[in-house]
Image (tube, rainbow, N blue to C red):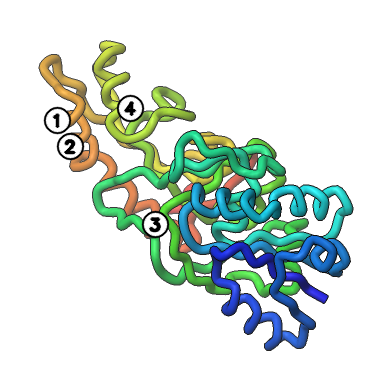
């Protein structure tokens, strides 16, 4: 029996229909005993992080979830239900999550040319050992609708997309990068430092923030009277908008090989 936790927030009926389609026995409940006697437990979720945590606590379901984890009953969080397992979220600052897994949920930074929320079909590359994706074929397409991403402390949590996701960072990595370096913050630090050159880097995304294999880089001048906004515009126009399309093109042509965390490009 699969128990779907009912806390007045979530895509409960969609999850129920999917499980019934797979031939599973399902019940929707917030009853402690029924949940703890289930074979598997699912925490679905659609809505706001803070509101959802308030609902869980008001029904005493946060304590039930801790018991489920302690008993090692197979547990799956879907969408917001997954986010609630972590410590906190940018969506509702000051509200603590369940804290079962170390890490936080961050908003995808605003960037010229990128639409937030991210919506659409993307293929997934499955890393060996990712149990959640067992029996799912390589390069399967799944539909994304999200404005937030997970920054997990445990690298084993993030397994699905090795050397398949790219990021363009508005500086020349390894300078001015890592946690806290995004958007205008990067250009502010560049100007404060007095360096004469900055630029952009396209790299593969890994568990380490801005630490993935570098694919392409391009430099741009830092002028004495630059403001962060002016420098941001120059870096985008002279660097980001040139190297990101090139990197994507190389990737689509299978011309990027990763060897020992470095990229080998075949032109």
Q: What residue does disc 2 label?
A: 233
- Name the residue at 40% across, 29% down: 181
Q: CA distance from mark 2 to mark 4?
A: 13 Å
Relative to the observer, which residue lies in front, 105 or 253? 105
Quarter the N terminus occupies: bottom right
Callouts 2 and 4 close, C-beta under 8 Å: no
Q: CA distance from mark 1 to mark 2?
A: 5 Å
Q: Earlier in the sequence, mark 2 or mark 3?
A: 2
Q: Earlier in the sequence, mark 2 or mark 4?
A: 4
Q: What residue does disc 1 label?
A: 230
Q: CA distance from mark 4 to mark 1?
A: 13 Å
- Name the residue at 45% across, 42% down: 92
Using the rendered image of the protein, determine whether residue 262 is visible from the camera's viewpoint: no
Give the foreground label among 1 and 3.
Answer: 1
Q: Earlier in the sequence, mark 1 or mark 3?
A: 1
**Tag 3's secondary structure?**
helix
Using the rendered image of the protein, determine whether residue 180 is visible from the camera's viewpoint: yes
Callouts 4 and 1 close, C-beta under 8 Å: no
Q: Residues within 10 Å of mark 1 (few under 14, many from 20)?
A: few
Rendering coords of residue 175 (x, y %): 41, 23
Q: What residue does disc 3 label?
A: 248
Q: Give me the disc on residue 186.
A: 4
**Tag 1's secondary structure?**
helix
Q: CA distance from mark 1 to mark 3?
A: 26 Å
**Tag 2's secondary structure?**
helix
- Name the residue at 30% across, 12% down: 193
Rendering coords of residue 99 (x, y %): 67, 40
* Image quadrant in which you'd find residue 116: bottom left
Q: Is residue 211 above or below residue 141?
A: above
């Amino acid at each position: 029996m699969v128990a779907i936790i009912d806390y007045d927030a979530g895509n409960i009926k969609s999850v129920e229909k999917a499980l019934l389609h797979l031939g599973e026995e399902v019940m929707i409940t917030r009853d402690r005993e029924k949940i703890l006697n289930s074979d598997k437990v699912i925490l679905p979720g659609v809505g706001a992080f803070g509101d959802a945590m308030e609902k869980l606590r008001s029904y005493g379901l946060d304590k039930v979830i801790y018991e489920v984890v302690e008993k090692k009953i197979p547990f799956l969080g879907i969408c917001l239900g997954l986010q609630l397992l972590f410590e906190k979220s940018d969506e509702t600052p000051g509200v603590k999550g369940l804290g079962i897994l170390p890490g936080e949920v961050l908003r995808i930074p605003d960037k010229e040319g990128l639409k937030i929320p991210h919506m659409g079909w993307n293929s997934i590359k499955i890393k060996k050992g990712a149990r959640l994706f067992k029996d799912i074929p390589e390069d399967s397409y799944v539909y994304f609708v999200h404005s937030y991403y997970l920054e997990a402390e445990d690298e084993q949590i993030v397994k699905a997309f090795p050397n398949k996701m790219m990021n363009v960072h508005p500086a020349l990595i390894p300078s001015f990068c890592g946690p806290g370096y995004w958007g205008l913050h990067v250009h502010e630090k560049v100007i404060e430092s007095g360096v004469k050159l900055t630029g952009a880097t396209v790299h593969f995304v890994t568990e380490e923030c801005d630490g993935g294999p570098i694919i392409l880089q391009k430099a741009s001048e830092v002028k004495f009277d630059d403001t962060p906004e002016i420098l941001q515009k120059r870096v985008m126009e002279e660097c980001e908008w040139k190297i990101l399309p090139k990197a994507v093109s190389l990737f689509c042509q299978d011309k990027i090989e990763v060897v020992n965390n470095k990229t080998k490009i075949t032109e």
